[in-house]
Amino acid sequence: MEGLPNEEITALGVGTLNPAVGGGESEWAIRSQLARVMYNYRGKYLLTANVRRDGSSRFRNHTWGVFPSASAGWRISDEPFLADNRFISDLKLRASYGVLGNQNTGNYQYQLNVNPDQNYAFGITPAIAQGSAPTAFGNPDIRWETTYSTDFGLDLGLFNDRLTIIADYYFNRTKDMLLGVPIPHSTGITNNPTLNYGGVQNQGFELGATYQKNQGEFQYGVTANFTTYKNKVLQLGPSDEPLTAGNTEFGSVSRTAVGRSIGEFYVYKTNGLYQSQEEINAMNINPDSKVKFAPNAKPGDVRFVDLNQDGILNADDRAFVGSPIPKFESSLRFSASFKGFDASVFIQGVYGNKIFNEMVVWTQGSHRFFNLSTDILNRWTPENPNTDIPRVVTKDPNGNLQPSDRMVEDGSYLRMKDVTIGYTFPEMITKRLKMSSLRVYVQSYNLLTFTKYSMYDPEIGSGAQGAGGTDNTSRGIDNGIYPQPRMFTGGLQFTF
């Protein structure tokens, strides 16, 4: 290695003229102080107060943040007026308020990043010379992202706690969000700078119920959970400009705008396929437009919607078509045991979210030399006009593959996540085998999935690999994420 910028650089290959190897090095630190006061009067009146002070090396001018919280509870079931109640075994009201800080951002976001491995060309007959160029603007004024959380809850136990219910209403407001904000490419900067760029609001209900019962040797229990979720963007920087993210092969698909939820899909709307040249001519008839609406369209191409009716298809014709955030999530667990046999089933699902299926581009498009799916056998042809799959054509002259609601699908699903059946041998057998316990079991994961989503797996996670932005602003994009496998296992558990 040659030409180290200074002796303080210790990572291999960084900043050298002729790097033979490469490497990287970074570090960060956090320092915290915490204080807590708790009060309990006869188990009926409960109070907890906390305050913590955190300092993060990821912030330069605003290193420290102070985050207080408090909670109170009233166990009504211990009051004299419920002492002889036969049905209510536990009743508690809860309320809490707290401030939470988030410093989950990259290291060194406060300083300018320079890449010393850039080539420059000089002269009419270019001579290549090595130089340096900035790759990211520093922002020394980034600070803690702060969330203000309010929660009201109720804990209820009935029939000697055979049935327990937990209900909560939550209301969270986040300000000074840490987001990577896109900037013009003309700056020459390849990385989006991190800013405290806005605020969001989240609210909803959480409900959980558990029922357990023993009838002799037969025991069983059922636990159900249900959560609603509503997200709303309150602010996006000083000008409230929408934030674009979710990069795909043919452009961005996600937009975060004030008054809407984070990372909604913002794409072109479509209305089937062109079936004849007459339909295409009718779209291009606007005399006030200097540019035809669909200049390269042929029968079998996608018919895009001219939302603003100006006779031109451009970014002004995009619309919000759905959110990747579910309207609610739910789960159900059932367990039972009888004379050494045991069984459990766990079911989980979400409802109301959308998925941008970029796999439609790669498995139905013929713009590149990819293998195509069998869906292409149902493509549009004059003999097969009743289909939603456009014609096969190279180079995609009509832009059939640009982001549109054709790629946006319902991501709701219900999945049997875990099924387990086991048998524990009786004590008389384990004693003969000189064991304390012996159990055999079989187990399956992702046994069944019920969904309308057309691709491999609707449970694609919160972020899209390589989609740009953050996990929140680019979630719900399926660009070939490997599906969760269906697995079957068996085992033997024993102790001596």
Image (tube, helix red, strand yellow):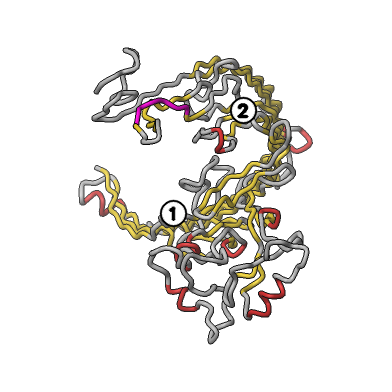
Along the viewing direction, whichever of 480 and 216 lies nearer the viewer: 480
Residue lying at the far bottom in this picture: please name it.
383
For residue 211, say whether it is visible: no
Identity of the residue drawn at 64% across and 70% down: 303
Quarter of the figure with the N terminus: top left
| Residue carrying label 2 | 145
Image location of residue 275, percent across then percent down:
62, 80
In this view, the residue farthest toward the front is 124
Examine the image and state in which quarter residue 306 appears: bottom right
Q: Residue at the left extreme?
A: 433
The amino acid at mark 2 is Glu
Q: Where is residue 245 drawn, in percent x and y?
A: 58, 45
Residue 256 against residue 439 in the figure, above or below: above
In the drawing, what numbered circle is on residue 386? none
| Quarter the C terminus occupies | top left
Q: Which residue is mark 1?
A: 481
How many other residues sit within 10 Å of disc 1, few (<14), some (14-19) or many (≥20)?
Answer: some
Q: Nearer the viewer, residue 77 or 207?
A: 207
Element marked by disc 2: strand
Q: Magenta segment range? A: 128-134
